[in-house]
Image (cartoon, helix red, strand yellow):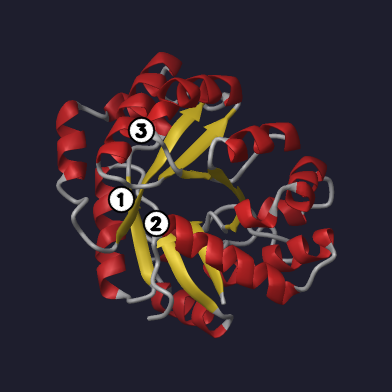
Amino acid sequence: MLVDTHLHLDMKPFDQDRQQVLERALECGIGYMITIGIDIPSSVKALQLARQYDFVYSSIGYHPHHASDMETQALKELSRLVSEPKIVAWGEIGLDFFHRHSPPETQKKVFRQQLEMAVDFDLPVIIHVRDAHEEMLEILKKTGKRRHKGVIHCFSGDYALAMVLIEMGYYISIPGIVTYKNAFQIQDVATRIPLEHLLLETDAPYLAPVPKRGKRNEPSFVTYTAKKVAQLRDITFQEVCRQTTDNAKTLFSLPDSL
């Protein structure tokens, strides 16, 4: 079994064949999927899908792209959803200084607020970070005394950064980018970090792995990422499946079986 720990099942690219996408995932041995909220509408849609399918779980949160849109009332609305048993994480939250759809200082403020909320509700966080690794670390270190737990999604840093984050208690999530020919940095990370701190994801519908690159990504394609990690580490595909599934179950408190 494999777990796709990060996808956006609510998005429009899946509207025409969502059921078929899920069926293909199950046929490929994807036992659980976590569909991610990036604002209030997507968090609500993600939860609705999780309620509909036993094997789908969801998260709630405000993506840094939408940080400027988040008001205090929005956090209250999200917090009202926390008691839902199918919600297993707070995220996708974080910092994105590459696109800068929201001002950096606003992103930092909203990131800190949501980290605090996640701790209050004892939920792991799903962190997005791009071109803001130092700023992310600074925030995590300042608030780390409250025992955050979580994952750095679609990891884009180097091995040294990965190990710092692992020492802080975070998991590192490997996307389909690891299958790309010149993706040397993420391949190095996937090869060297402890397997006990590694998760797998698609980020579907984005970032389809080789040999599906350029097409819409979907949860069944996480198998290609798992096979690449196995190749890089010179271990069996089954070992990657077993350990990354155990990791996902531990972090997100997923059941041992449906």
| Helix, strand or loop under label 2 | loop
Q: Callout 3, which amino acid?
A: Leu
Which residue in the protein does label 1 denote?
42
Q: Nearer the viewer, residue 12 or 10?
A: 10
CB within 8 Å, label 2 to label 3? no
**Residue position marked by numbered label 3 in the rendering:** 115
Q: Quadrant of residue 32?
A: bottom left
Q: Could you tell me which residue is drawn at 44 percent across and 28 percent down?
A: 144
- Residue type, numbered disc 2: Met
Q: Work out which quarter of the rendered image holds the N terminus and state it.
A: bottom right
What percent of the width, then of the height, locates residue 80?
14, 47
Kindly check if marks 1 and 2 are in contact, taking CB atoms under 8 A apart as contact. Answer: yes
Q: Are marks 3 and 1 in contact (CB under 8 Å)?
A: no
232 or 146, nearer to the observer? 146
Q: Which residue is mark 2?
A: 11
Q: Residues within 10 Å of mark 1 (few under 14, many from 20)?
A: many
Residue appearing at x 68%, y 57% in the figure:
195
Mark closest to the chain's N terminus, 3 or 1:
1
